Amino acid sequence: MRKYWWKILSILCIIYAIVGGFLMPAPDDVGILAKTIRNLHFHVPMWFTMIILLLTSYIYGIRFLASSDLKHDSMSSSFIKIAMLFGLLGLATGSFWARFTWGTWWIEDAKLNGAAIGMMIYLAYYILRNSIDDDIKKGKFTAVYNLFAFPIFIVLIIIYPRMAETSLHPASGDTVAFSSLDLDNNLRKVFYIAAIGWILLGVWLSSLKYRLTELMRIDEEI
């Protein structure tokens, strides 16, 4: 039972985020965000989770280059695949949020465009991966690709948006991030727990994907 505690915690945190996210009183003085501020508990943790999963993949990619252990390659690719899932959820919740605050599903914005380009970079990762048959070569080529992809991704979604002259997205360009002015104590009670829950769920799904990948690899070898 002890080894499952973090999985149980993940489920409880997400249930709390869903229930508390809709029932917890939201601040009234958040401008055009209004009650859509509740989406904060879902949209932002998706990107937190994606970044952590990509960082984990990056580390295992380096470990594979150092050891040529295919288990490390399986771990790296599995974490990227689940990270892509959370990235898509991040784009979907962000687009939904934009529709009800900015009046459109998508705008020309450094943050949004950077996120979309970052997703395409990792889509290219899997195109490269599926174009190589030899497992060792596949692992090495994609691990080297990942060495460049992750830093570029961070630049696209964090550094580049902050350098933009104007932006509607919080913490980008001339727009301030969420602060004490709009992220009140009621939101914090849900937001931090939601972030923990989604991150743990991402790690859980990635570990399941890794086990499935390893089973398929072993089956092919047999």
Image (spheres, rainbow, N blue to C red):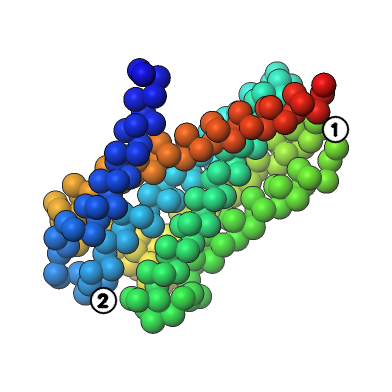
Image quadrant in which the C terminus is located: top right
Relative image position of residue 125 (x, y in whole percent): 70, 47
Above or below — where is 15 with respect to 90? above
* Residue picked out by circle 1: 134
User: Residues at badges 2 and 1 in contact (C-beta under 8 Å)?
Assistant: no
Q: Amino acid at mark 1?
A: Asp
Residues at marks 2 and 1, CA–CA distance in whole angstroms: 53 Å
Label of residue 86 in the image: none
| Residue at 49% in and 50% down | 86
Relative image position of residue 209 (x, y in whole percent): 59, 36
Relative image position of residue 196 (x, y in whole percent): 33, 39
> Which is more N-terminal, label 1 or label 2?
2
Q: Could you say which quadrant of the image residue 208 lies in?
A: top right
- Left or right of 147: which side holds 105? left
| Residue at 81% in and 28% down | 220
The answer to whether residue 60 is seen in the rendering is: yes
Label of residue 32 in the image: 2
- Left or right of 88: which side holds 212? right
Q: Amino acid at mark 2?
A: Ile
Q: Secondary structure at mark 2?
A: helix
Relative image position of residue 105 (x, y in whole percent): 46, 76
Q: Secondary structure at mark 1?
A: loop
Image quadrant in which the N terminus is located: top left
Above or below — where is 198 with respect to 28? above
Q: Could you say which quadrant of the image residue 173 lies in?
A: bottom left
